[in-house]
Image (cartoon, helix red, strand yellow):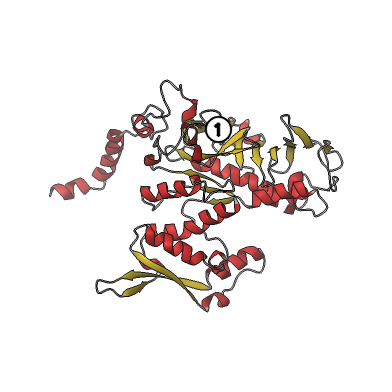
Amino acid sequence: MLVDFSVRNFRSFEDESLFSMNVESGRNRLRSNFQEVSDGKLAVLKSAAILGPNASGKSNLLRAIRALKWIICESHRLPEGASLPTYEPFRLSEKSSASPVEFEIEFIVPSGMRYRYSIGFLRNRVTHETLHSFPGRQKALIFERGPEDTWEDVKFGGTYKGGSRRIPFFKSNSYLSKAGNDASAPESVREISNYFRTIFSVSAGTKLRVANYFEQDGHLEAVSDIICLADTGVESVTAEARSEGSDLRLPEDMPEDLKEAIIQENSRSYKFWLRSKSGGLIEFEEDEMSDGTIKLFEILPILLNAISCGAPVLIDELDGHLHTNLVGLVLELFHDPLLNTRGSQIIFTTHDTNVMNSTKLRRDQIWMTSKAQGSSTLFSLDEYDKKLVRQDSPFEAFYLDGRFGALPSLSYSKIRDRLSKIVEREGYFKDVVE
């Protein structure tokens, strides 16, 4: 489970911003929305919504978590002298554009151990890297790497046990990535790497499906049933094999897992069956269905897979093509203690203000972004005075009223004046009058 995450100098986040899933207080409020861990010493939220104007930084927060996942899972592949593709500093400041990007994350792996990991990096090298565990109340050092440390200089704490320590790396590799992908490293370190691999991320407008999900017994039927129950008008969804997938020509240097996913995606087609007025079932292709139905069909395997394995899922614009009631359904799936038994979490951006319902979400589950002079700021409703924003306040009404900020600043009169000059210059006004 993700407990908290901080980002500094990444894309639009110039200064350090903290995003937290930690329940600080009010455990008597919407108890199904969080899970207690560490014998009740800690409570972690199962969902969080991020709202704000376009280009305010919502997507960049999710990008930052994805960037950290890449560093932990993939940077071990970088050869000597290679650049880190995740180095995207804040570019509107000369100082920041040449400074390290910094991430820090606290998380809990499936075995129950809690960790805190931090890393800073420039384009061609990691500047610092540390990993701590929480075997008790106090954190304990596992390893620490400084700006000039080579693989022979990494410092280790007493909790690093059970495997090799001195694992060679280049300057642009993270030590955690190298150790997490080395069979000689301790099992606990490899568990961390495997945990980050389970994080599933969906960018806005991306068509993604969980590889081989529908090939497993009962999965297509389960998704089909949910789509039918969601009032889409669909009676069932079926799959048919097609031969075109075997004729695909893919680049030889394409990663094998990506090749497999593309081939699998093109190896079958899906049919949607609707009932006619006469009572019979009529077959429809995917491209004949509504965007909302297809979005639900694509996203359900991702959500169900995350819930079944206890993984976090990041979704940019969850409400894209989805009715607000279906967004509410997604939240109910994650909040349901009978379904979500392994601590899966969903973190999503949205423009759907209906999620700001105090009977559905807590203050600490609602986050907002705003931007000034190109720099993003991140804050939650829980940071407001509890006397002004109570747990039962009408969050949506307050937001739309401008009490929290994080709203688009529009001047229609200026927009109209600018457009009128263009239209007048092109002669459109004259044509309309005549």
Q: What residue type is labelled 1?
A: Val
Residue found 50% across the figure and 40% down from its top: 32
- Measuring from the top left, give residue 38's x and y in whole percent: 65, 37
The x, y position of residue 63, in whole percent, is: 56, 45
Residue 202, above or below 252: above
Give the image location of residue 67, x and y in percent: 62, 45
Out of 67 and 322, give the one closest to the viewer: 322
User: Residue 395 occupies which quadrant of the picture?
Assistant: top left
Quadrant in which the N terminus appears: top right
Say left or right for 275 vs 404.
left
Circle 1 residue? 23
Front in this rendered view, residue 279 or 374: 279
Q: Residues within 10 Å of mark 1 (few under 14, many from 20)?
A: some
Among all residues in the image, which is located at the extreme left?
434
Can residue 81 be seen?
no
Name which residue lies at 33% across and 29% down.
401
What residue do we see at 83% from left, 52% from top?
A: 184
Residue most extreme to the bottom:
243
Q: Is mark 1 on a helix, strand or loop?
A: loop
Observer-nearest of 346 and 46: 46
Horizontal side, residue 77 vs residue 160: left or right: left
